[in-house]
Amino acid sequence: MSIRTPLGAQSKEKDAGHALTRRDALRFGGVALAAACATKRGSSEETSPEFRLKYILGSCMYGYGKLADIVPEVQKTGATALDIWPKVHGNQREQLDELGEEAFAQLLDKHEVKLGCITQYKLGPLKLQSEMRLAKRLGCHTIVCGSVGPKGLSGSELKEAVRKFAEQMKPHLAVAEETGVTIAIENHGNALVESPDSLKWLRELRSSEHLAIALAPYHLPQNETLLASLIEDLGSSIRMFYAWQHGMGCHTKLPKEQELLQMPGRGKLDFAPLLAALRKIGYRGWTEIFMHPVPRGIAILDSTEQVTDEINRSRKYLGELL
C-alpha cells in the first residue's frame, strides 16, 4: 500500500490553537493552490452532481435528550442515520438498553432512519466484541473509538507503537469481519493515534480494511493545506469525517458564541480545500457535523429545535462550498 513519507512532527491539542512551521506551510502550500484552482475551474469532474456528503447525526449534540425526541430530527438535518453516543457526552446508548433492541429498531423504522454508527470510547478498541454483534443485529456497520498505546512518540518509535497496536487489533478485526463492522479509530488528542504521522502509519500497517480512521480536524493543526493533503494520503481508509474545527477549544466554559466557533462556517477554518480533497478521493463515508459543549452531557444549545437549526446552518455552509 502506497503512502507518503510521514511528516515526523507530532500534533498536540491546545485550546489556544495549533502552530505550523514555515517549512510545513511551504511544503503544503501547493495543495491549497491546487484545491483553490480546482474549485474555481468548474470542470465537469469538480462540479459532478454525483459527489455528496453522506450525513450522520451525532446523538450527543442534543446532550442527554431522549431518543424519542432526537430520532425525528435526523432527516431534518439532512442525515439518513444516527450516531449513538454513551455517557458522558450523551446517554442515548444507555437509553437503547433501557428501550430494548426491538423498540429501538421500531423507533428508527418509524422515522425512516438507520443506525449508522455506535461511538464507544468508553469500551475502547479491545472490548468491542459484544458491541459489534449488537451493531450487526441493528444493521449498523461502523463503530468509532480511540486507540491504545504509548503517547507522545515520533519517528521510528511511533511507527513501531502503531504496528503493535495494529497487531493487537487482529483478533478483534476477525469479529469485525464476521459482523460486517468497521472499527474507525479517531485521532483523539493525547493518544497514540493523534498526529498525521500516526494516522498514515495506521493506514499502512493495518491488517484489514475493517480497521479504519475517523478523521477529526479539531485535533490537528488548523491549516487547510495540511488537512487537505492528509485527506488525500488517507484516502479510502477514512470512514468517518467530523466536520469540526478547533475554534476556541472545548475544555473551558466560554460564552456560547465562542463555543460555537467549533462548528463549520463559524470558526476560521476554511473547509473548501478539505471538501475538494474529499471529492478527489471519492469519499463515501459518513460526515458528522460536530462540536463538544462545556460541560459534557448538555445539548449544544438550549432546545432541540435550536440544535437542529445550528447543524443546518453548518450544513448550508458546507453545501455552498460544494
Image (cartoon, grey):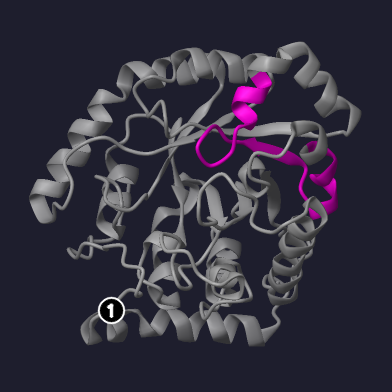
Q: Nearer the viewer, residue 315 or 64?
A: 64
Instruction: Quickly name the residue at label 1.
Output: 20
Based on the picture, tell me whether residue 290 belongs to the magenta stretch. no
- Identify the residue at image location x=22%, y=40%: 162
- Identify the residue at image location x=46%, y=56%: 216
- Identify the residue at image location x=13%, y=55%: 154
For the N terminus, give its image quadrant: top left
**Is 255 left or right of 206, judged from the image as shown?**
right
For the C terminus, give its image quadrant: bottom right
Count of marks overlaid on the render: 1
Q: Nearer the viewer, residue 284 or 271?
A: 271
Mark 1 burial class by Cα count in 10 Å: few <14, some 14-19, many 20+: few
| Residue 68 percent coordinates (x, y) | 81, 32
Q: Is residue 230 visible?
A: yes
Mark 1, secondary structure of its residue = loop
**Above/below status of 314 relative to 160:** below
- Identify the residue at image location x=32%, y=35%: 206
| Residue 289 percent coordinates (x, y) | 63, 57
**Is 146 left or right of 110, judged from the image as shown?**
left
- Amino acid type at circle 1 is Leu
| Residue 121 percent coordinates (x, y) | 43, 34
| Residue 70 percent coordinates (x, y) | 77, 40
- The magenta span reads 71-96
Q: Is residue 284 visible?
A: no
Q: Nearer the viewer, residue 183 or 218?
A: 218
